[in-house]
Structure formats: structure tokens, C-alpha cells
Amino acid sequence: MADDQPFPPGARRAVRPTAVIDCPACGELAGRGYPTCLVCAELVDQFWTLDWRPLVEVAGLPELELAELVLLEDVGKLPWTCTDVAMTLLRCPACGAELGTGDLPCLRCRVADENRWAWDHMGYPTRMTGNEHAMRVARMVLRAPHRHRETIVQGWRLTMPFLLLGELPTTSQAQRIRAHVLAERYDELARCRSLRELAGLPSVPWRKEV
Ligand SMILES: [Zn+2]
Ligand SMILES: [Zn+2]
């Protein structure tokens, strides 16, 4: 499997959309309904499945068997997307949840989730872009929201549609978006249609400095 490519890129086979769209199924900006809205789920997961499918074809194994093998591979030998799909397919032997997404006390899930990030430590920034890393984090957080603070989940949910376009908030944009989320302004933020708008939400009147 890709011996000549110690760091095959992940999530680069799908063509990025050029603009955000309203999801016809859930009405949110497409991607925000992940993973419960099936249309949003497909839109996000296409970046992962386009790497996974060829691997399945080459391997010629049942998917669950392949998933087990993928997690035993050396880090970086396969695209990170394939690690994620393998974890999505497998159940945690200890708690029964999707591997890596069980409730926080589950040690097996914690170890599996921590191991997944080894790719990012090794691949970033030359073999994995900041946008790809952010997409990976966003997908993982939205698949296991109970493992994270609500404000973190909201931040990634708000950002996901723009990550799909290939965008990445700057550090200062991310800080401002986070501040707005912490101020419980999710509904206002959800109406914004660009990262610039999300980060540029005006202060509420009573907070304005005089
Ligand atoms: Zn949707
Ligand atoms: Zn578990």
C-alpha cells in the first residue's frame, strides 16, 4: 500500500465547492448538519470516502477487516482520511461506541483518539495543510460532541462550511469567533455567510466602549 509515498495526502481528491450553499435537507449552511443530516454528512464525508474507496478496491478485503489493518499501519503510510474512516467503521471493544467517540472515561477510545493525531504531528505543515488539519478536527468533534465543551462544538459547527471551501480562519478570526460563541451569540453567527462576517460580528451595544 503506497510504499513509495510515506505521506500520501488526504482529502485532496474531491473538488472543493466554490461557495457556501444552504443545505436543502436541514436548512443550515451545508456542512453544519454533520453528521445527523445525511446531505451534510455526505458533503463532508466525500473527502474521506474518495480516499477510502480506492484502498478498499486495492485491498480486496471486507471493509471491517481492512479497517483493522489500516489502524495497525505505520503512521503516515496511508492518508489520514483512511485512518478516520477505519475508526468510523470500527466499534470500540470496551464501550461499543464508534472507535474513539465513546464517553470520556473509556480508555480505549481515548487512546484510539490520541493515536489518530500522530499523523498531524508528523505531516503538518508539509504533507497536511492547516485547512486539512482543521477539517479533520471539525469532523472528529462533530462526530463526538459529548467529548467536548459545547462552545468548542459550536465553533467547529459554525466553521465547517468554510473549511469545506478550503478556507481557514486566521488566528485573530478564530479568536473573535470564539469570543462571539462564548458570548452565546450562536444564532447571530449562524446567519453569517463568510468567515470574515463570522469574525466581524459587531459588538453588542451594551458592550461598546465609550
Ligand atoms: Zn444538512
Ligand atoms: Zn470506547
Image (cartoon, grey):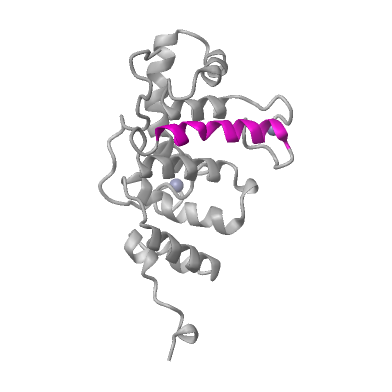
Q: Which residues are magenta?
A: 106-123
Whether residue 196 is in magenta: the answer is no
Image quadrant occupied by the C terminus: bottom left
Q: What residue appears at the point 36 percent right and 57 percent down from the top-left corner? A: 170
Q: Position of residue 200 (x, y in %)?
A: 36, 69
Determine if residue 97 is in view.
no
**Is 149 situated above or below 47?**
below
Indicate the quadrant containing the N terminus: top left, top right, bottom left or bottom right.
top left
Is residue 114 a member of the stretch shown in magenta? Answer: yes
Please, is residue 95 above or below residue 135 in the view?
A: above
Q: Residue at x 50, y 30 (%)?
A: 84
Q: Quadrant of residue 203?
A: bottom left
Q: Residue furthest top?
A: 60
**Left or right of 28 in this view: 147:** right
Q: Could you tell me what secondary structure mostly forms the magenta stretch?
A: helix
Q: Quadrant of residue 46?
A: top left
User: Residue 63 at what x, y percent from top left?
Assistant: 52, 16
Q: Residue at x 39, y 63 (%)?
A: 172
Residue at 44% across, 15% down:
56
Residue 147 at x, y percent in the picture: 64, 46
